[in-house]
Structures are given as C-alpha cells and as structure tokens.
Amino acid sequence: MSGPVHLTDANFETEVLAAPGVTLVDFWAAWCMPCRAVAPVIEQLAEEYAGRAKIGKLNVDENPRMAAQFGIMSIPTLLIFKDGQVVDQIIGAQPKAVLRAKLDEWLGVS
C-alpha cells in the first residue's frame, strides 16, 4: 500500500522538478478544512495511479519556500507537473472525478 509522497522544500526538486512523467502536488495545511476534505481523495488517487503518476502532498506551513515559488495564494491548490514543468492548476477542493479526468488528460488516457 503506497500513499502520497511527503514533499518538502528539501526534496521537491528531486521528487517533482527532476522527475519524469506526471506528478500531482497537493499544496495543503492542517488547519484548512477543504484540504482535509480532499485528503482522502488524494490518498485514493495515490493508490489508483501508482506506477503511472506520482501523487504528493506539500504542507505550506512547514514548507513556505515551495509554496512561494509557485505563487500558492489559496489552499488547497493542486498543481500537475509533466516532466518537471507545471502544466495544470486546480484550486479548491474538487470531486475525485475532476482530479481523475485531469490526471488522465496529462497521462494521455482517453
């Protein structure tokens, strides 16, 4: 059983920016109720997309450098990276179907 990758300011470059393929990053904070609402969906997606896409979570309170670098102004914000480049952004808690459709789009799944 594999959950989302725990991302930090220290490992972000290796885990996301230098990583090939598609990565979904959930920028969140413990006090954020919408973040907590979407957390189980992120866990499920990490399981479902294991081996096809990397799913990670970055706590903005503990890792302000990456949040600032990507201009995160409200949370939850989910960024989709492809080969280390931001290709899509989802702001706010969204249903699993929306997140799955975005991942599938960038994975080339029809």
Image (cartoon, rainbow, N blue to C red):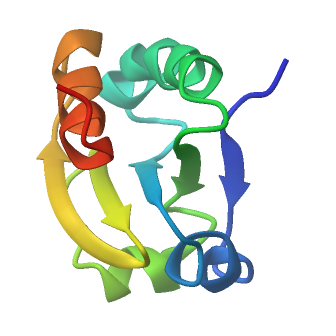
Q: Quadrant of residue 100?
A: top left
Q: Is the residue 96 above or below the residue 94 in the image? A: above
Residue 67, x across and y down, in percent: 39, 73
Nearest the camera: 17 or 31? 17
Q: Is residue 61 left or right of residue 97?
A: right
Residue 36, x across and y down, in percent: 46, 22
Residue occupying image coordinates x 85% and y 17%: 1
Check the picture and name the quadrant holding the C terminus.
top left
> Looking at the image, how many numbered discs can be counted on the residues?
0
Q: Is the residue 48 above or below the residue 85 in the image? A: above
Residue occupying image coordinates x 26% and y 31%: 109
Q: Is residue 73 left or right of residue 61?
A: left
Q: Quadrant of residue 10?
A: bottom right
Q: Is residue 93 left or right of residue 41?
A: left
Residue 6 can be seen, yes or no: yes
Q: Residue furthest right?
A: 1
Q: Is the residue 104 above or below the residue 81 in the image? A: above
Residue 16, x across and y down, in percent: 55, 71
Nearest the camera: 28 or 21? 21
Residue 46, x across and y down, in percent: 59, 28
Residue occupying image coordinates x 61% and y 85%: 13
